[in-house]
Image (cartoon, helix red, strand yellow):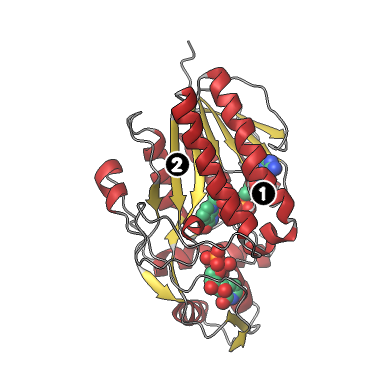
Amino acid sequence: MHLTKRVLVTGGAGFLGSHLCERLLQEGCDVICADNFYTGSKRNIVHLLKNPYFELLRHDITFPLYLEVDEIYNLACPASPIHYQNDPVQTTKVNVHGSINMLGLAKRIKAKILQASTSEVYGDPAVHPQTEAYWGNVNCIGPRSCYDEGKRCAETLFFDYYRQHKLKIKVARIFNTYGPHMHPNDGRVVSNFIMQALRDEPITIYGDGSQTRSFCYVDDLIEGLIRLMNSPDDFTGPVNLGNPVEFTILELARKVIALTGSESKIVFKPLPEDDPKQRKPDITLAIDMLGWQPEVILEEGLKKTIGYFRNILEGV
Ligand code: NAD
Ligand code: UDP
């Protein structure tokens, strides 16, 4: 019997994973971070390397992994459309082969396992806001399909291991999350707009900017993941984790310009294929089952994120 909880975080050097590793260490866990640095960065975890309870493994989860832990958070997967579309076959592989490997590991060592799923399982949603009961509107042959269908298949695998092998599973459907440790060239909207604003470069809005997203600050999201992992075994999810306050992309651009005091002008570029028109989580289930809801408003979270990117640009 181990007194310290041993936790594996796959994708632990990425944006969310690095915050999760940090939080788990603060809670006294023994943390193993497995990452192949496909989109993650040592910069995100370098401050953790001195901690004797933190262990870094360079590992690609599409290959089997043998170790002993009590809990697994499966976050490994590129999350930005630019990155996951760069090698779509690998994106499907990490979601399907990677999930099978991590579920197989959980089965062998009887560990509890949490999947970082996504609002993308709802595709371009016809139901608004999205509840967990909605089955989604997903194109299976488009440029986003490797990610959307990969994540959907991963959820299927999690629930089949739950039913067939009685695994303890948790599935979080994460909505757009932002904050420090996002890669400056990540390509997602918050990092793009802030980097462009700080450099006084044009802010690139895809389409007319009327599409909506709901942005969750990273600290809130990590709290949600931890609460989900610690919830009673009979609560598997899927559960939406995200901030239900909805903004248009044009509103986001204006906010970033105002908060950075930038000289940037807004320019309009073509809308990528299958770009969802609207997205906003219904978080009733998370409130009821986890007592969780986001606390950080967009302006406050943007200020912290702007500070982080400013430091990167200034080489701090
Ligand atoms: P990220 O790209 O910053 O992190 C992903 C991490 O996984 C990186 O460190 C990357 O190197 C690693 N990785 C990729 N392929 C791997 C492999 N084969 N083996 C081992 N490591 C691998 O993205 P993120 O925003 O931190 O997202 C983390 C997870 O949360 C992803 O599964 C993503 O789909 C999910 N998610 C994120 C958001 C969001 O808004 N940030 C929204 C929905 C879902
Ligand atoms: N977007 C944009 N300009 C950018 C990057 C993204 O207008 O420089 C838009 C994108 O088309 C989408 C929204 O912002 O409508 C969110 O994009 P992101 O890539 O962050 O995540 P998504 O929610 O689409 O997965």
Question: Quarter-wise, where is residue 237 in the image?
Answer: top left
| Above or below: residue 237 compared with residue 85 | above
Disc 2 marks a residue whose amino acid type is Val
Disc 1 marks a residue whose amino acid type is Thr
Tell me the SS state at disc 1.
helix
Q: CA distance from mark 2 to mark 1?
A: 18 Å
Instruction: Report crowding for label 1: few under 14, some 14 to 19, many 20 or more residues within 10 A (C-alpha).
Output: many
Tell me the SS state at disc 2.
strand
Q: Nearer the viewer, mark 2 or mark 1?
A: 1
Judge whether residue 143 can be spotted in this image: yes
Task: Give the residue at mark 2.
Answer: 171
| Above or below: residue 260 compared with residue 280 | below
Q: From the viewer's perspective, is 249 left or right of 203?
A: left
Image quarter hosting the C terminus:
bottom right
In primary-sequence order, the first of circles 2 and 1 is 1
Instruction: Report crowding for label 2: few under 14, some 14 to 19, many 20 or more residues within 10 A (C-alpha).
Output: many
**Number of disc labels:** 2
Q: Nearer the viewer, residue 157 or 75?
A: 157
Question: Quarter-wise, where is residue 213 in the image?
Answer: bottom left
Q: Could you tell me which residue is drawn at 37 percent across and 39 percent down?
A: 227
Judge whether residue 22 can be spotted in this image: no
Q: Nearer the viewer, residue 159 or 26?
A: 159
Q: Position of residue 173 (x, y in %)?
A: 45, 50
Q: Position of residue 169 (x, y in %)?
A: 45, 32
Q: Could you tell me which residue is drawn at 51 percent across and 58 percent down?
A: 120
Residue at the extreme top of the image, as rendered? 1
Ligand 1 under 8 Å from disc 2 Cβ: no
Q: Position of residue 122 (x, y in %)?
A: 46, 59
Label annotation for residue 179: none
Task: Give the residue at mark 1.
Answer: 92
Ligand 1 under 8 Å from disc 1 Cβ: no
Q: Could you tell me which residue is drawn at 65 percent across and 38 percent down?
A: 98
